[in-house]
Image (cartoon, grey):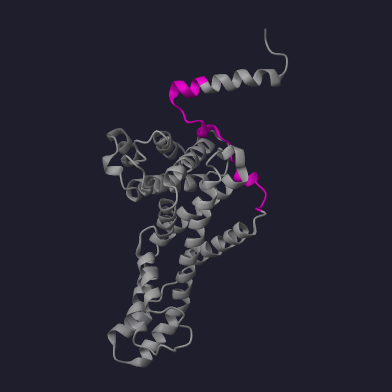
């Protein structure tokens, strides 16, 4: 007989879902629902401040204006202290901005570490506010690092500053970094994905195996939200999904951790979802996975074809 109420039908539906998942080896996290747009603003003051700083940093990097001319003048006339001083003063606002980005990256890495630890004994669906925060951070990390790649002037400005700053008095107003600190920031901003690698470093120093499960769930859940048409605002889910794939691939796990052969990440479905629903950003998404992961060249040919064709 047919159950008389929806409540009576739920167990049957749940059982059937488990059967299909087993048949097709589908990760349950592909069916999780984490609607970030429906989650109220966080009540956590630390996260709230972090999100504000993330928003400000994104505006800064998208509107970044490089200063090549003062550097060029200082290099062409290397023995003029006034030109060197003018170059430093012109570059300082950008240099200070870059320094705040590194500070933000460290706070982001700490937040990701804290958030992933919340899911050691529960799934993303069991703590949607924390999951939504993790999605938001991952989406920012990917988008920020992509913007940085498109702004070569950022690295050029900082390299030019390092070259010129040694020629001005140490007590010049506004000089907030000593040589050691400048070197650290310079190495950080020179990386292709500076914020991503801050996050990876923090997770590898903590509990990479425990974090890996959550990172995989983020990738799968974002994929399911898009492919299952559970959201109309797909862009941040794509960004968070790709960030999670890249981070997972760089975690230091025993026995290797290629995201392309992992049983945790539904990588084939993720790549198919990009092909089918990525729109005008499809090529950018595929290139990001291909060139930002460390194990793509060892991936199965069928997986590589999904990125390359």
Based on the picture, tell me whether residue 36 belongs to the magenta stretch: yes
The residue at 55%/19% (across/down) is 16
Task: Give the percent coordinates (x, y) of residue 57.
Answer: 52, 64
Residue 148 vs 82, above or below: the answer is above
Residue 67 appears in the picture as rendered: yes
Which range is magenta?
Answer: 19-42
Residue at coordinates 69% horizontally, 18% vertically from top-left? 8
**Quarter residue 150 falls in:** bottom left
Q: Position of residue 124 (x, y in %)?
A: 56, 40
Q: How many marks?
A: 0
The extreme top residue here reads: 1
Q: Quadrant of residue 155?
A: bottom left
**Image-based side of 179 in relation to 100, left or right:** left
Asked if residue 38 lies in the magenta stretch, the reply is yes
Whole-percent x, y for residue 114 in the image: 53, 52
Quarter of the image containing the C terminus? top left
Residue beneath the point at 29% across and 87% down: 78
Instruction: Give 241 or 111, whichever is nearer the viewer.
Output: 111
Quarter of the rendering occupied by the N terminus: top right
The foreground one among 284 and 172 is 172
- x and y percentages locating residue 43 in the rendered image: 67, 54
Q: Is residue 63 visible?
A: no
Task: Name the foreground residue: 302 vs 34.
Answer: 34
Q: Is residue 253 above or below residue 173?
A: above
């Amino acid at each position: 007989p047919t159950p008389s109420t929806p409540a009576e039908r739920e167990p049957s539906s749940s059982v059937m879902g488990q059967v299909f998942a087993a048949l097709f080896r589908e990760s349950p996290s592909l069916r999780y629902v984490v609607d970030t747009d429906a989650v109220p603003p966080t009540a956590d003051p630390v996260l709230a401040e972090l999100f504000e700083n993330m928003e400000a940093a994104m505006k800064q990097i998208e509107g970044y204006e490089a200063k090549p001319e003062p550097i060029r003048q200082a290099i062409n006339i290397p023995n003029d202290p006034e030109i060197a001083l003018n170059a430093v003063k012109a570059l300082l606002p950008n240099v200070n901005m870059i320094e705040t980005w590194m500070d933000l990256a460290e706070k982001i890495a700490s937040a990701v570490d804290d958030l992933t630890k919340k899911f050691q004994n529960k799934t993303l669906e069991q703590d949607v506010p924390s999951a939504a925060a993790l999605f938001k951070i991952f989406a920012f990390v990917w988008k920020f690092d992509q913007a940085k790649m498109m702004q070569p002037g950022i690295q050029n400005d900082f390299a030019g500053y390092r070259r010129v700053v040694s020629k001005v008095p140490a007590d010049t107003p506004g000089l907030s970094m000593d040589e050691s600190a400048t070197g650290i920031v310079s190495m950080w901003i020179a990386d292709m994905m500076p914020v991503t690698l801050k996050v990876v470093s923090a997770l590898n120093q903590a509990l990479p195996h425990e974090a890996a499960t959550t990172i995989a769930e983020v990738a799968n859940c974002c994929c399911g939200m898009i492919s299952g048409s559970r959201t109309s605002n797909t862009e941040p889910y794509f960004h968070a999904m790709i960030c999670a794939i890249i981070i997972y691939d760089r975690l230091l796990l025993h026995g290797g951790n290629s995201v392309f052969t992992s049983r945790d990440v539904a990588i084939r479905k993720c790549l198919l979802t990009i092909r089918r629903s990525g729109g005008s950003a499809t090529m950018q998404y595929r290139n990001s996975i291909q060139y930002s992961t460390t194990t793509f060249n060892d991936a199965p040919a069928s997986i590589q074809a999904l990125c390359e064709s």
